[in-house]
Image: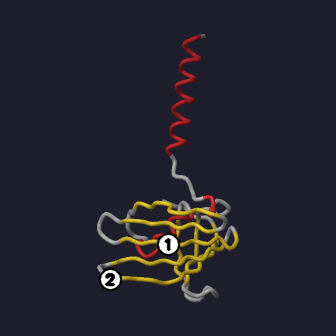
Amino acid sequence: MQKLVRIGLVGFLTVTGTAMAAVTIPRALAPASGGMWEVSRSASGHNPTRICVATPDMLAQFEHRQRSCTRKVLTDQGTETLISYNCPAGGFGQSKMTLITPRSLKIETQGISDNLPFHYQLYARRVGDCAAR
């Protein structure tokens, strides 16, 4: 019986440790979820780009969406979060994300991409589920 308890405890600690190591979404974005998002420079949603993300904070690096970048939450208050990110192949950025509704975000982003500065505003709308990577 003691052996069984030890195995159960080890299993519990392993599962708990894995859960704690998982990426946490900024509180401001907690009502939103990953999935298929349409991202546009227009609030009306004109000419959107569709992107499938596991978590909504990944939209912070929209300019570098094809790259594996590390993200760091700088501030997280109310419905706004400020996320900084760096990409190993070069390029970096900072994005202020505002939760409008659980299916709608405003993203103000700036940084350096391909050795050139960028600065623009985006509107993102969740349109459904997808098999996020």
Q: Residues within 10 Å of mark 1 (few under 14, many from 20)?
A: many
Q: Residue 75 got which mark?
A: none
Q: Amino acid at mark 2?
A: Leu
State if disc 1 and disc 2 touch (CB < 8 Å). no
How many tags in the picture?
A: 2
Where 11 falls versus 98 (above or below)?
above
- Find residue 53 and report its horizontal and vertical position in percent: 53, 65
| Left or right of 51 on screen, residue 104 | right
| Quadrant location, the N terminus | top right
> Which mark, residue 116?
2
Measuring 55% from the left and 83% from the top, which residue is drawn there?
A: 40
Q: Choose between 123 and 26: the one closer to the eye.
A: 26
Could you tell which of marks 2 and 1 lies nearer the N-terminus?
1
Q: Residue at x 31, y 79 (%)?
A: 114
The residue closer to the viewer here, 30 or 124, is: 30
Q: Position of residue 120 (x, y in %)?
A: 49, 84
| In this rendering, position of residue 82 left or right of residue 64 | right
Decide if residue 29 is on the left or right side of residue 132.
right
SS category of the residue bearing label 1:
strand
Q: CA distance from mark 2 to mark 1?
A: 17 Å
Relative to residue 32, is residue 119 depicted above or below? below
The residue shown at (62%, 64%) is 129
The percent position of residue 65, horizontal first and vertical second, equals 43, 71
SS at mark 2? strand
Q: Residue at x 59, y 17 (%)?
A: 5
Q: Residue furthest top?
A: 1
Q: Return the residue nearer the eye: 39 or 113.
A: 113
Query: Within the image, what quadrant is residue 70 found in?
Result: bottom left
Q: Which residue is mark 1?
A: 95
Residue at the right extreme?
101
Kind of residue at badge 1: Ser
Pinpoint residue 19: horizontal percent, then vertical percent. 55, 42
